[in-house]
Image: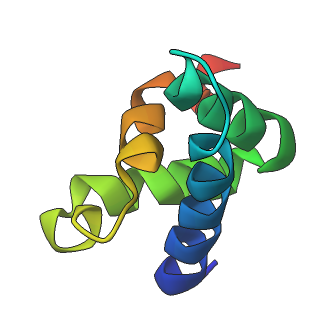
């Protein structure tokens, strides 16, 4: 999937969860991505975050959620 689309979608999800109460917002973002994004999408997203030019475009909650994502090697 195109990097712009992944970033846009992750930022939309993070913005939604930002409006919720709680201290586990990054965990909720990660749970949503783990539940609704396929392994390839999650792997592509992690690759984007490792690119410093792309990481700056991410909502902080989306960036924090990356460490909590299940990746194909985790299965």
Q: Residue furthest right?
A: 36
Residue at coordinates 78% horizontally, 49% vertically from top-left?
A: 38
Residue at coordinates 44% horizontally, 42% vertically from top-left?
A: 61
The x, y position of residue 34, in whole percent, is 73, 34
Horizontally, residue 6 falls left or right of residue 58, namely right
Residue at coordinates 56% horizontally, 75% vertically from top-left?
A: 8
The x, y position of residue 70, in whole percent, is 61, 27
Horizontally, residue 37 falls left or right of residue 9, namely right
Q: Quadrant of residue 52?
A: bottom left
Residue at coordinates 58% horizontally, 56% vertically from top-left?
A: 15
Q: How is the image coloured?
A: rainbow
Quadrant into which the C terminus falls: top right
Above/below status of 14 relative to 5: above
Horizontally, residue 66 falls left or right of residue 1, namely left
Foreground: 50 or 15? 15
Quadrant into which the N terminus falls: bottom right
Foreground: 23 or 1? 23
The x, y position of residue 64, in whole percent, is 38, 35
The x, y position of residue 41, in whole percent, is 65, 57
Q: How many marks?
A: 0
Above/below status of 64 relative to 21: below
């Amino acid at each position: 999937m195109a990097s712009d689309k992944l970033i846009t979608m992750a930022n939309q999800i993070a913005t939604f969860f930002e409006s919720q109460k709680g201290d586990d917002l990054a965990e909720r973002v990660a749970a949503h991505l783990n539940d609704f994004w396929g392994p390839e999408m999650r792997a592509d997203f992690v690759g984007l975050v490792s690119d410093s030019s792309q990481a700056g475009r991410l909502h902080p909650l989306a960036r924090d959620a990356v460490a909590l994502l299940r990746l194909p090697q985790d299965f």
